[in-house]
Image (tube, helix red, strand yellow):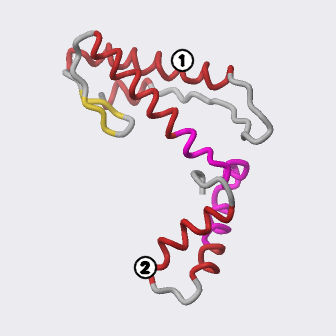
């Protein structure tokens, strides 16, 4: 529902998945499922069926490409897996710094862009992920 740009396209996508379940009324089931999801996540209401998910995936992919490019310029081999990277242990601090810088840069680009009336205005909240890095990288 975050990737869809309308209620209709979201429902159709869900119906395509439900058809394999041999449900008698997949459109009705899809509508009920959408309402259940919305009720479970009321804070995301303005993002449902807005295409926000696709925009976020694009931003994530751009961050990943920028991180990889910067590491290559420093001759650091890196394997990206979704939103994570595998690098040699000695490059851990460099990777952390590059990821933090690229995330901050992406947020600056995002907040500096003008939005038109069709786009959903979003606020960027950066979590403190330093504990994650120190424990998991």
The image quarter in which residue 67 lies: top left
Q: Crowding near pointer 1: few (<14 within 10 Å), some, many (20+)?
A: few
The image quarter in which residue 122 lies: top right
**Residue 72 in picture, x, y percent from top left:** 27, 16
Q: Crowding near pointer 2: few (<14 within 10 Å), some, many (20+)?
A: few
**Residue 9 in picture, x, y percent from top left:** 62, 62
Q: CA distance from mark 1 to mark 2?
A: 43 Å
Q: Secondary structure at mark 2?
A: helix
**Residue 115 in picture, x, y percent from top left:** 74, 31
Left or right, 55 with reference to 130 = right
Q: Quadrant of the C terminus?
A: top left
Left or right, 89 with reference to 51 = left
Residue numbers of the magenta segment: 33-56
Q: Secondary structure at mark 1?
A: helix
Query: Magenta stretch mostly in which secondary structure?
Result: helix
Pick whichever of labels 1 and 2 is earlier in the sequence.
2
Identify the residue shown where x is 64% and y is 68%.
36
Of all residues shown, which one is farthest toward the right? 117
**Residue 7 in picture, x, y percent from top left:** 68, 62
Name the residue that disc number 2 marks: 20
Identify the residue shown where x is 40% and y is 28%.
64
Q: Quadrant of the N terminus?
A: bottom right
Query: Within the magenta stretch, is there residue 15?
Result: no
Name the residue that disc number 1 marks: 105
The image quarter in which residue 27 lies: bottom right
Query: Within the magenta stretch, is there residue 41?
Result: yes
Nearer the camera: disc 1 or disc 2: 2
Compared to residue 31, the image places residue 132 above or below, namely above
Name the foreground residue: 102 vs 97: 102
């Amino acid at each position: 529902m975050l990737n869809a740009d309308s209620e209709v396209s979201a429902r159709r996508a869900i119906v395509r998945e439900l058809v394999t379940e041999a449900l008698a009324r997949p459109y009705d089931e899809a509508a009920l499922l959408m309402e259940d999801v919305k009720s479970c996540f009321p804070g995301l209401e303005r993002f449902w069926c807005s295409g926000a998910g696709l925009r976020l995936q694009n931003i994530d992919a751009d961050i990943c490409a920028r991180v990889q490019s910067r590491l290559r310029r420093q001759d650091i081999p890196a394997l990206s897996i979704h939103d994570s990277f595998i690098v040699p242990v000695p490059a851990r601090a460099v990777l952390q710094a590059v990821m933090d810088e690229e995330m901050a840069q992406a947020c600056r680009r995002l907040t500096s862009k003008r939005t038109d009336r069709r786009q959903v205005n979003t606020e960027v909240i950066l979590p403190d992920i330093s504990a994650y890095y120190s424990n998991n990288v």
